[in-house]
Amino acid sequence: MVKGRLADDVYAAADVRLAEADARVAARYPGEPSGRQPVHTVYVPASQYRTRLVADWGKQACKVFIEQGDALGLDAEVAERVRAKLLTEPIEDLRIDFEDGYGSPGDEAEDADAVAAGRTCATTGGTPFAGIRFKSFERATRRRGIRTLDLFLSGLLENGPLPPGFVVTLPKVTAVEQVAVAAEVLAKLEDAYGLATGSLRFEVQIETSQSILAPDGTVAVPRIIEAAEGRCSGLHFGTYDYSAGLGIGAAYQSMDHPAADFAKDFMQVAAAGTGVRLSDGSTNRLPVGDAVLTGWAEHLRLVRRSLERGFYQGWDLHPHQLPSRFAATYAFFREGLPAAAARLRDYATRAESGILDEPATARALALFLNRGLDCGALDQSEVTDLTTLDRPALDHYARR
């Protein structure tokens, strides 16, 4: 073995000096988590939640797609996949809303709705991911939010186990300490209901200026992730609360406003490598009545824009947004399939091509293909034909 001129104690000293940093980086940046990420979260006011809600949304979405979907000008393959998706899995992630979409009907009514929603969620299912958005941990609504979550879990767990993909949403964070207390409350609820430690996880909505910039001038988003102590599964951008809080006029509030992009850039940098996933917000321009086609066009544009910027999830608020959500998502993955598959195949087989990719890029290519498979845009057989890789091999590259 060839020896350099440095003594062994130099190597040892470097290891000692960086041991603490190595441990911190490994704990803070575990990389992309395994498992599926939904392409959207559908928000439904708790007062409207019912047993057949998912089926009814799918039926309504399918009806409008059959009636007017030709106007979207979709490729035949994409159109057929959208139709099948609306029939089989119209909602990937359902959030039963006890916050802005629900209001404040009084404690008695909210208590009853919370228990009833929990029971319905336990006995209905129908979506790979589900949970509730409770009221914020600001002083005025904190106790109500905690009580609603407690009662919902009571109704849910009295009728079955905690569903796979269960997640709750903490809105309107104005202090990092609210996130820390939310994590503590979830731990107490796990003890109270006999749940495994860490089984209750939450998303943090980034919809206030304080959740981007703390009062001391530091960036708040990384501190929010840290304060969650491993329970934060996602950061969700709240388009309209955030925009309104900055004084942006209602006519100009949008997912693509420069102020929204500024906040989402901070979210993206802070979450990278942490295992915390990102979701863009919603558009309130609904494709209904005479505005179906214009609403679809706007939604298609915004969903595609989010995907191109690395936000693979968003919010949907109406059944008519489901066709445009899946149309934009499926077109994105199918258009990107040939190039992504070819580059990953060349990387895996060490073939010479016009592009020299590195491990990080191979990881991104595998993640892209996995996302397309998870949502139904792609089939494993076609991906394997193009890459020579089966799903375990794709997972291997995605986690390298």
Image (tube, rainbow, N blue to C red):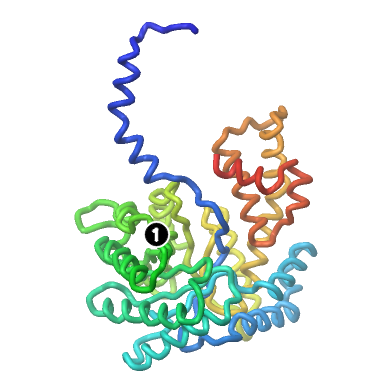
Q: Residue furthest left?
A: 216
- Report the residue at 80% width, 64% height from top: 76
Choose top left, top right, bottom left or bottom right for residue 89. Answer: bottom right
Q: Position of residue 150 (x, y in %)?
A: 36, 78
Image location of residue 270, percent across then percent down: 38, 50
- In the image, 191 versus 176, the foreground residue is 191
Tell me the residue that label 1 is attached to: 232
Residue 163 point in image, percent of width and height? 52, 71
Whether residue 353 sits left or right of residue 240 in the image: it is: right
| Residue extending farthest front | 194
In terms of secondary structure, where does tag 1 sit? Answer: strand
Q: Residues within 10 Å of mark 1 (few under 14, many from 20)?
A: many
Whole-percent x and y of residue 81? 74, 66
Q: Quadrant of the C terminus?
A: top right
Which of the 4 image quarters holds residue 20?
Answer: top left
Q: Give the residue at x 79% y 45%.
A: 385
Task: Tell me: residue 168, above or below residue 44.
Answer: above
